[in-house]
Amino acid sequence: MGLSAELITTTGAFEALRSEWNDLVSHMERPEIFHYWEWNWFYFKHYRTGDEPFIVVLRDPKGKLVGLAPFCRRQVRRLGLRIRVLDTLVVNLADYRNVLVDGALHRQAAVEPLLGLLHEQGDIWDVIDISQLNTTDSTSLHLLNSAQHRLDWVVRCHFLTAVALRALRGRRLVENDTRLRRLRNRKKNLQKAGFTFSIGRPDRIDLWPAFCELHRKAWPSSALRDPQGPAFFDDLRLGGALSDKLEFSFVEFEGKVVAAHFGFVDAGKVYFYMPVMDDAFRQQRVGGALLCAMIEHYTPTHELFDFLRGTEDYKLWYTDELSMNLRLVIHRSASVRAFAYNFAEIVRQSMIWFGLPKAAVQAARRMLARRKPAPPAPEPD
């Protein structure tokens, strides 16, 4: 089955894809909450000022949308050169990104025409730099494999971060029994002390301002600190295909929210997206107790609990199952602009590979130690 590939570069055409886009996501083998049109559209609206859509749509002979590459084109300057970079529409706030492919379609059948169009349109971009391609979706590996077969392209693959996943039912599960037994006992003791746990309460919209304030205080890098962040999440919460997929859970003590989680939940999976707790209650481990309560709550009804990016120790108490996020950087061979784009990173990585940053720190410490004045000799008795 031959697929046609079309390039979309206007916001109007991007907006018009909404219904078809979400229908495609619903037919994917591994749909993610971050794949929906709303997540991409609202991010582009609030964060991509000055960038332009660069969306590749793939249709079957009947005109049905069966594949989609949610890219955009941005411009950066490196070493004095203007460089045109193809990136995913969403960065930072989406833990998974990828080319979207209908579950009934062979992934390579979608990847090949996509890369073919990008190759034909090579005069309007300099570098493709796409991140957070998760290995549980083999589309990521098909992209890597097919791109490497193009002899006039240079392809680099980076391992970014591991992702912890807990099977809630029907699959193998290995956990840290000792740690989790303590947490469950902690939760029971907190409940006896007057802490109340509310799980799966997206209707408590009245607590959203309290959650935002708590998150801003707890996380210096919180997306809710910038004007775009609250506007983006308000759009996600209040309308569209994601409004019925919200997850909001919290712990209260004496009428005050002391721990909370804002995330998402679909028919099979829970996304552990934005947890937070009041630092004044850190000793009581209210955040850990809330997570424990969430997993207990969703175990009878859902299949997977996704901890998303990062492998903090507490996540691995619940599971030993990991996947990996990748980054692909693609450019034409002998490209001056690609050299300028990659120069700083290649130098940094080379220094790391040769141990230079660590060696420089150790040398500086030795030099300071030699220059430090010796302590005065003790006075004779």
Image (cartoon, rainbow, N blue to C red):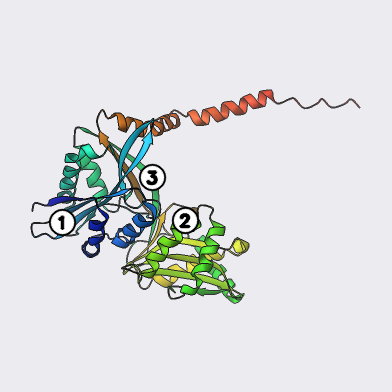
- Residue type (three-letter) at the residue carrying disc 3: Leu
Per the model, the C-alpha gap separating discs 1 and 3 is 28 Å
- Residue type (three-letter) at the residue carrying disc 2: Ala
Q: Residue furthest right?
A: 381
Disc marking residue 105: 1
Tell me the element at label 2.
Answer: helix
**In the drawing, does residue 107 fall left or right of residue 375?**
left
- For label 1, the crowd category at 10 Å Cα-Cα, with few meaning under 14, some 14 to 19 and many 20 or more, is some
Closer to the N terminus: mark 1 or mark 2?
1
Q: Which residue does the numbered mark 2 point to in the structure image?
A: 223
Does the CB distance between marks 1 and 3 fall below 8 Å? no
- Is residue 229 depicted above or below 133 in this figure? below
Residue 111, can we see it?
yes
- Residue type (three-letter) at the residue carrying disc 1: Leu
- The percent position of residue 154, horizontal first and vertical second, equals 26, 34
Tell me the element at label 1.
Answer: loop
Closer to the N terminus: mark 1 or mark 3?
1
- Is residue 184 depicted above or below 340 in this figure? below
- The percent position of residue 250, horizontal first and vertical second, equals 50, 70
**In the drawing, does residue 325 fall left or right of residue 356?**
left
Identify the residue at image location x=73%, y=25%: 373
Tell me the element at label 3.
Answer: strand
- The percent position of residue 260, horizontal first and vertical second, equals 50, 66
- The mark closer to the camera, 1 or 2, is 2
Q: Which residue does the numbered mark 3 point to in the structure image?
A: 160
